[in-house]
Image (tube, coloured by chain):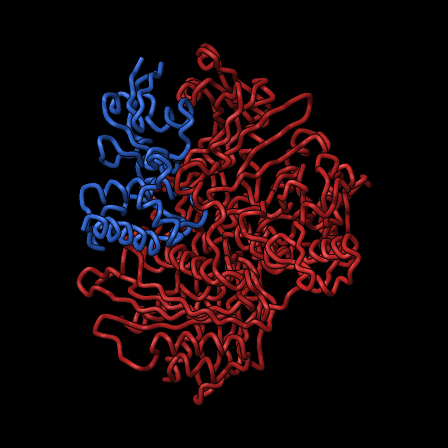
Chain colours: A blue, B red
């Protein structure tokens, strides 16, 4: 029995701790927002946050997530309010098929968490491990910049 | 060896037989309201049946192209066999319906690609949704609106010309009265079949022609949107399939006792097909690893001999008689589609009826494949296509659907099968590789006098030249392809434009003319001239010289009714040979524009995708094995590869709308190659042009 802290709730799962976090999230807990894309941590579609840091859940064994705060795409919305980056993704429409979008948003949200005012180069660097085959990269960069700008204006 | 499958989607039609079914069967489930059927005209119906495969029955009458239902609950539902794969048609088709029905976007829902609920459709490919399905839905919606106006006129006993439809209501302005669409039918079910009634001209569009937010955007950004691989059924188990170690290998013997000993595992064997199911993916993987199989492999071709194989037996073109002659050979490598969502399916058998949820561009085609694989009538197969993590031409086939269905029959439970990335790279199909020979002659004044063009294997799309050349010989030659190949976004138009537009650049330099001026001198076609000029003007072509180590290139062309020109700027690092595509500008014209933001996104996205095939993507293989079947070994474009991308939309409201998902990318590779030539004096004639940068010598 492993206790997990996911999106602010405690969940107990009885399973092999060597399974990937991604498969437990998707298959056992029905949190299918995190996607499988490559299984080797190369595409970022499975990105979640562990204690606020972006990790690839497809290469993270379940035991490594125990005792940590796990945030998935489903946990970014709070009390019906979208995360600022979710808002800006909608506004800029930084998506086509949308399959990479959850991983992109979680990676971007993790970046904004530690760096509220990233330069373009910092955004490219932080997002380099996330692939969008539809090619929406320029619009994703715009969305991250917009969310950062709004957060800054909000703080003033 | 797999036989060549040329431009495979163009060969696919519907089933050859279509037994009569009372179409009213479909609508039993629907409540009161208005149903409009959009009929396919006789000529079209016959044409689409010609290429069909025999012996199949269809539950949906073939003569219906789409239908829509305006319910008494106030909801309007549109049924189309087209599917959403990231090209944004769920939104653009909703716009079209709202335009004619005078409804807000949120009150219309699209049911797409469900073989039991939507009319037959050959598939979503070839940029046909905008030119075919959009006018069809537009007509159906317009007919529904006229029907509603007629009902209101009858209810109030007034002339219909006094009434207008707006925001879901019919209003008589003079009498200041208004009635909601849903109140007009009063429990009746009214059905009308239409062909093509008059619809709103692009000049008068209110909803179309403007950008509309993606209809399911919120579900996507919150992770709630369900793709095929997110499907789940009660009691579902997870499947894995035993794969041959090399292409063409035959299974000699197999021992599955180790797998069967694992808890909850079922092994299914059917000829060379061996697969397992288990309560979790992890146990399914273990079970697969526990199978002991002996395979007999036979020698298979390798990548280093690819171009020789494709051109086997061909003769070189003769050099033409002219002031200046050029003969050059171009090659394009196999590339993979790499949709971020690999092939996936969930299959379930209930009382002999098979239902499969799967990501495919051809739900009706997959239904046929399933019916044939299991020797059952198509009426016993339902394919449901949730929106998918895209395809780019790579998901026309139903491999995962068939495998999941076979495993489900063996396990007697619903089965989910998601291909691994390695399986997707190895067992899907690739974009055809090709060799293109060009020989051309040009007079000193820049007039092209002859053009000979031979494409081996990659395909015939976009092979014709629009330049005015008196003497031309243009041929596509089929070859035996070492790898299984099929459709890819823009098909061979990418290869043919790469060769043609690179060679045009070579000719321009040979006669010391500006490449744009040289093209325009040999081109009368208005629409191509217009985009070339628009691209050049906005790029600042001829206005400034590139800095040292940089170069500018231009290329243009046409495909699927769209006209495109791209200008590129590259920077080459003299010491490392690294090439950076710095800036891309693409001018595009596809008739009247439905959704400008959606179109701009398609262009930008196709530039990013095209960059991979132009610069570094190639599937490597040796003796029946793919050598780079992982994202750590097969490089696709990433954030840091992003150039400045600019788009210029040329809107021709006087012309019908053409699709834009494909043709936008065809001028990119030659524009980049031509820019590299200007920067370095090196002519790169192979795609990908620089997987490891330029060799510095």
Q: Quadrant of the C terminus of chain B?
A: bottom left
Which quadrant would residue B566 be assigned to in this image? bottom left
Q: Is residue B402 visible?
A: yes
Res B120 seen here: no
What's the residue at 58%, 79% (across, down)?
Answer: B471
For residue B470, what is the image quadrant? bottom right
Q: Position of residue B507 (x, y in %)?
A: 42, 78
Say left or right for B84 vs A123.
right
Q: Is residue A63 left or right of residue B306?
A: left
Residue in front for this viewpoint, A139 or B639: A139
Q: Residue at x 31, y 61 (%)?
A: B643
**Horizontal and vertical percent position of residue B250:** 53, 29
Of residue A15 and residue B461, the one placed in the foreground of this image is A15
Residue at 57% x, 41% y is B397
Please state which of residues B133 and B191 is positioned toward the viewer in this rendering. B191
Q: Is residue B138 left or right of residue B214?
A: right
Q: Position of residue A75 (x, y in %)?
A: 33, 33
Q: With A32 as the anchor, is B272 left or right in this view?
A: right
User: Considering only vertical position in the picture, is B368 above or below A60?
Assistant: below
Above/below status of B580 relative to B438: above
Q: Is residue B126 above or below residue B628?
A: below
Which residue sits at x=45%, y=11%? B263
B580, above or below A35, in the image: below
């Amino acid at each position: 029995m492993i206790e997990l802290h996911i999106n602010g709730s405690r969940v107990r799962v009885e399973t092999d701790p060597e399974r990937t976090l991604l498969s437990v999230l998707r298959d056992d807990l029905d949190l299918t927002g995190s996607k499988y894309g490559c299984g080797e941590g190369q595409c970022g579609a499975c990105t979640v946050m562990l204690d606020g840091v972006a990790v690839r859940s497809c290469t993270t064994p379940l035991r490594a997530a125990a005792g940590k705060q796990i945030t998935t795409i489903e946990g970014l919305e709070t009390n019906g309010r979208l995360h600022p980056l979710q808002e800006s993704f909608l506004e800029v429409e930084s998506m086509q098929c949308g399959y990479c979008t959850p991983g992109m948003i979680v990676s971007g949200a993790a970046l904004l968490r530690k760096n509220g005012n990233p330069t373009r180069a910092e955004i490219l660097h932080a997002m380099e491990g996330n692939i969008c085959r539809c090619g929406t990269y320029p619009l994703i960069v715009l969305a991250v910049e917009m969310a950062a700008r709004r957060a800054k204006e909000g703080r003033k | 060896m797999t036989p060549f499958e040329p431009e495979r989607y163009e060969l696919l039609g519907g089933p050859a037989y279509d037994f009569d079914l009372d179409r009213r069967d479909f609508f039993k489930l629907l409540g009161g309201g208005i149903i409009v059927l959009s009929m396919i005209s006789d000529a079209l119906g016959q044409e689409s049946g010609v290429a069909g495969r025999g012996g199949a029955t269809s539950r949906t009458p073939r003569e219906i192209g789409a239908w829509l239902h305006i319910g008494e609950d106030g909801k309007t539902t549109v049924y189309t066999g087209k599917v959403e794969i990231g090209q944004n048609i769920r939104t653009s088709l909703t716009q079209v319906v709202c335009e004619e029905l005078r409804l807000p976007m949120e009150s219309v829902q699209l049911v797409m690609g469900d073989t039991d609920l939507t009319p037959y459709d050959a598939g979503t490919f070839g940029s046909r949704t905008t030119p075919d399905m959009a006018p069809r839905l537009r007509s159906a919606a317009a007919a529904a609106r006229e029907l509603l106006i007629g009902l209101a006129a009858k209810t109030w006993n007034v002339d219909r010309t006094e009434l207008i439809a707006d925001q879901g209501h019919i209003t008589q302005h003079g009498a200041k009265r208004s009635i909601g669409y849903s109140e007009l039918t009063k429990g009746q079910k009214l059905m009308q079949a239409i062909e093509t009634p008059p619809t709103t001209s692009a000049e008068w569009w209110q909803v179309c022609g403007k950008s509309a937010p993606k209809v399911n955007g919120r579900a996507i950004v919150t992770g709630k949107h369900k793709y095929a691989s997110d499907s789940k059924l009660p009691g579902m188990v997870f499947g894995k399939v035993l794969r041959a170690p090399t292409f063409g290998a035959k299974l000699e013997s197999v021992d599955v006792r180790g797998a069967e000993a694992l808890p909850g595992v079922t092994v299914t064997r059917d000829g060379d097909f061996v697969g397992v199911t288990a309560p979790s993916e992890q146990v399914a993987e273990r079970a697969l690893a526990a199978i002991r199989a002996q395979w007999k492999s036979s020698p298979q071709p390798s990548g280093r001999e690819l171009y020789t194989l494709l051109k086997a037996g061909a003769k070189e073109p003769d050099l033409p008689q002219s002031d200046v002659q050029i003969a050059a050979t171009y090659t394009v490598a196999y590339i993979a589609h790499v949709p971020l969502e690999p092939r996936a399916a969930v299959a379930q058998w209930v009382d002999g009826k098979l239902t499969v949820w799967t990501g495919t561009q051809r739900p009706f085609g997959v239904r046929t494949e399933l019916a044939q694989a299991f020797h059952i009538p198509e009426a016993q197969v339902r394919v449901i296509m949730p929106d998918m993590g895209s395809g780019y031409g790579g998901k026309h086939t139903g491999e995962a659907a068939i495998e999941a269905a076979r495993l489900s029959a063996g396990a007697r439970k619903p089965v989910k099968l998601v291909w691994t990335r390695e399986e997707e790279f190895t067992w899907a199909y690739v974009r055809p590789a090709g060799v293109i020979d060009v020989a051309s002659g040009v007079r000193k004044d820049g007039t092209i006098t002859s053009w000979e063009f031979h494409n081996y294997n990659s395909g015939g799309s976009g092979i014709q030249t629009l330049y005015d050349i008196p003497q031309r010989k243009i041929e596509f030659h089929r070859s035996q392809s070492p790898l299984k190949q099929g459709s890819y976004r823009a098909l061979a138009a990418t290869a043919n434009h790469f060769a043609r537009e690179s060679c045009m650049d070579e000719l321009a330099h040979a006669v010391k003319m500006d490449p744009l001026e040289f093209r325009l001198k040999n081109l009368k076609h208005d629409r191509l001239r217009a985009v070339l000029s628009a691209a050049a003007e906005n790029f600042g072509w001829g206005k400034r010289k590139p800095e040292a180590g940089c170069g500018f290139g231009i290329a243009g062309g046409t495909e699927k009714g769209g006209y495109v020109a791209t200008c590129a700027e590259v920077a080459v690092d003299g010491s490392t040979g690294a090439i950076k595509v710095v800036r891309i500008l693409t001018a595009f014209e596809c008739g009247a524009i439905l959704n400008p933001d959606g179109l701009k996104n398609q262009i930008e996205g196709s530039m990013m995708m095209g960059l991979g095939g132009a610069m570094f993507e190639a599937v490597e293989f040796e003796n029946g094995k793919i050598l780079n079947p992982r994202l750590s070994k097969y490089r696709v474009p990433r954030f840091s590869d992003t150039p400045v991308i600019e788009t210029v939309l040329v809107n021709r409201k006087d012309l019908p709308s053409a699709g834009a998902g494909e043709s936008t990318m065809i001028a990119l590779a030659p524009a980049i190659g031509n820019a590299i030539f200007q920067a370095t004096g090196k002519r790169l004639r192979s795609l990908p042009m620089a997987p490891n940068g330029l060799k510095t010598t």
